[in-house]
Image: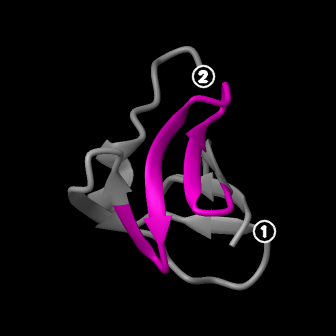
Amino acid sequence: MDGRVLNSKGIHVAVVNGAGIFDINGRKLYNLKDSKIYRLTGELVGHLSKSPGAEQRLDRANDKLFPVGSGR
């Protein structure tokens, strides 16, 4: 599953590339196994919706994984 990750408000917050989730600057943030999001330490922290297409949406509960600063 590759593509963009959008938060619950539709803001682009990350990119999925293979089994990794990267911030928009290219820094690896999380590992992805199926739809489960894991910290790089192996701790399960959330889920990514399995939707068809290149955009994946987070639900509100998982928005905290990808904080969006003011000014974006």
Q: Residue at x 45, y 56 (%)?
A: 31
- Locate residue 22 relative to residue 31 in the image: left or right: right
Residue at numbered disc 1? 54
What span is colored magenta in the figure? 17-37
Q: CA distance from mark 2 to mark 1?
A: 22 Å
Q: Quadrant of the N terminus?
A: bottom right
Callout 1: SS? loop
Q: Which amino acid is tagged 1?
A: Ala
Location of residue 24 in the rendering, given as x and y in whole percent from the top left corner? 66, 32
Mark 2: give few (<14), some (14-19) or many (20+) Cα within 10 Å. few
Callout 2: SS? loop
Q: Residue at x 66, y 25 (%)?
A: 25
Tag nearer the camera, 2 or 1: 1
Q: Nearer the viewer, residue 43 or 50?
A: 43
Q: Residue furthest top?
A: 71
Label 1 near label 2: C-beta < 8 Å?
no
Residue 34 lies within the magenta run: yes
Location of residue 36 in the rendering, given as x and y in whole percent from the top left corner? 38, 72
* Rendered image coloring scheme: one colour
Q: Which amino acid is tagged 2?
A: Arg
Q: Quadrant of the C terminus?
A: top right
Q: Residue at x 43, y 48 (%)?
A: 30
Indicate whether 28 appears above or below 6: above
